[in-house]
Amino acid sequence: MTIIPIRDLKNTMEIERRCAEENGPVFVTKNGYGRLVVMDIEYYEKTMSKLREAGLIAEGLADLEQGKTAAADAVRERLGAKYAF
């Protein structure tokens, strides 16, 4: 994990290098407190994808807990009738 003071943001090439090397976020502090996070776009996209997947899993688990399920055979029959396959 990399932590840098906000004044170091002036050196954009160094920040870019650190993001690429770390393959993760670079935390930026101001007066000793966390203020910003800078990260490589690929790392950001992977992180956002994982968050979306986790949300879908949580949604599916909630459906299971609430009994919002159907037997696979019944679903297959309904879909087959509706879409003729």
Image: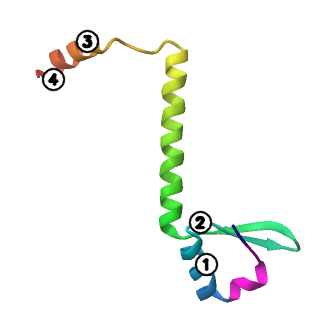
Q: Is residue 77 above or below residue 34?
A: above
- The image quadrant where one finds the N terminus is bottom right
Residue 24, image x and y in percent?
59, 65
Q: Nearer the viewer, mark 4 or mark 3?
A: 3
The stretch drawn in magenta includes residue 53 = no
Q: Residue under circle 2?
A: 24
Q: Mark 4 Cα within 10 Å, few/some/many (few <14, many 20+)?
A: few
Q: CA distance from mark 2 to mark 4?
A: 45 Å
Q: Nearer the viewer, mark 1 or mark 3?
A: 1
The stretch drawn in magenta includes residue 5 = yes
Sequence-wise, the earlier of marks 2 and 4 is 2
Where residue 83 is drawn, which disc sits there? Answer: 4
Q: Is residue 57 above or below residue 74?
A: below
Sequence-wise, the earlier of marks 4 and 3 is 3
Q: Residue under circle 3?
A: 73
Residue 49, image x and y in percent?
47, 51
Mark 4 is on which residue type? Tyr
- Looking at the image, which is closer to me, 20 or 36? 20
* Count of labels in the image: 4
Where residue 50 is drawn, which disc sits there? Answer: none
Mark 3 is on which residue type? Asp
Magenta part of the protein: which range? 3-10
Q: Nearer the viewer, mark 1 or mark 4?
A: 1
Residue 33, image x and y in percent?
85, 67
Where residue 18 is drawn, which disc sits there? Answer: 1
Locate residue 85: give its quadrant: top left
Write the residue at 48% across / 42% down: 53
Mark 1 is on which residue type? Arg
Mark 2 is on which residue type? Gly
